[in-house]
Amino acid sequence: MQENSHIPATDSDVERLVVGVDVGGTKIAAGVVDPYGQVYSRVQLPTDTDGPERTLQSIAAGIEEAILAAGIRKEQIHEVGLGIPGIVDPEHGIGLFSANLGWKNVAVTRWLEDTLRLPCVIENDVSVAALGEHLYGAGQGVHTMLYMSLGTGIAARVVINGRLHRGSHGLAGEIGHTVFVPDGPLCLCGARGCLETLASGPALARLAWEKIQAGHITLLSDLDILKRGEQLTAEHLFAAIAQGDSLSKQIVFEAGAHLAYAVYLLAMSFDPQIIVLGGGLAHEENPLIETVRSEVARWTTRSPVFQEIWAPDMLRLTALKRDAGILGAAALVSASDAIRKL
Ligand SMILES: [Zn+2]
């Protein structure tokens, strides 16, 4: 899939073009972006996860396709920014661990720089999304913001005074792997009862499936996809709620209440100007987002100090939508000097 939308305006803009790359477990999105967040090309191709070398080859192919689709030469690209799932060492350009990609200690930037002859910088994908939202999206002009990604996984990131706050290990904001229910469901990280096991997209589907197996009455049981042996998703629960399904409503409410508690904890910890919700589940007013909004508001009645921090318009949805990954990775290049210094 290729799209070429614009031609660079001036010579100085051309000199500062970057490629932003969003590396996901199933697809790679890449695009050429100028310093103003104008996207000149968008390409998307499947991620080859058949070994680190194959994955790096598919990333390199995405970068070259994005440059080709923008109608420019590789020499015109200033730098490449990449958002990568999992734990990342941006200083040394290493993908330390990624369950989605099957990576452990992969020298990402060295391989890409040797292959492409372009300077590359990497960061964790949620950190990249937070930077993108800060530079080009809902967080423009804001000094302190939290970004929370709700989707297959759950994670938050903190931007303080316009800079990503990584913490000592790059794990600041890992609320998704914070235990909310001791002895709860087993998480991929090895803990029990992490927020991610209670409120992520796969968690909602799993909770519903367990209830169906236990014989609970729900409209979800009638779905054709189950008869075909396909997996439930959170979106099926949202659709069932619109038709009055009480089981789906209960599951989504409990997940939303857990997420609201996470927002409350993060807001109390960092006193941000805004909190931006992004990721696959953070689309316009679905029942999960509505529950998060209403349950966060309830914390003001339980917690007087929170009343000082909170205002209803602080909780916002991502403004970047389909270009979030590409713009975020491009923002990483803008922030790369700051990150290297940390
Ligand atoms: Zn966990």
Image (cartoon, rainbow, N blue to C red):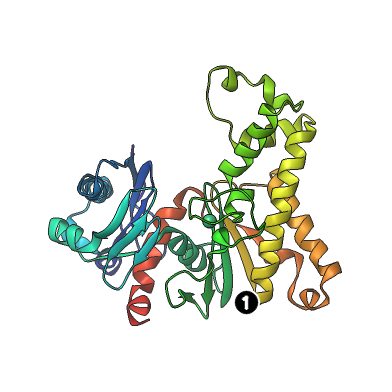
Does the numbered disc 1 mark a residue whose Cβ is under 8 Å from ligand 1?
A: no
Relative to 115, is 342 on the left or the right? right
**Based on the displayed image, in which of its 4 quarters is residue 25 positioned?**
top left
Which residue is nearer to you in this view: 37 or 43? 43
> In which quadrant of the rendered view does residue 112 lie?
bottom left
Q: Position of residue 166 (x, y in %)?
A: 45, 74
Q: Is residue 260 above or below residue 302?
A: above
The C terminus - image quarter: bottom left
User: Where the N terminus falls, by quadrant?
Assistant: top left
Residue at 33% over, 48% down: 102
In the image, taking residue 157 as reference, residue 65 lies left or right, namely left
The residue at the point 43 percent across, 54 percent down is 325
Which residue is label 1 attached to?
Answer: 270
The residue nearer to you, when weighing 290 against 182, is 182
Q: Is residue 131 left or right of residue 232?
A: left
How many circles with numbers are drawn on the protein? 1
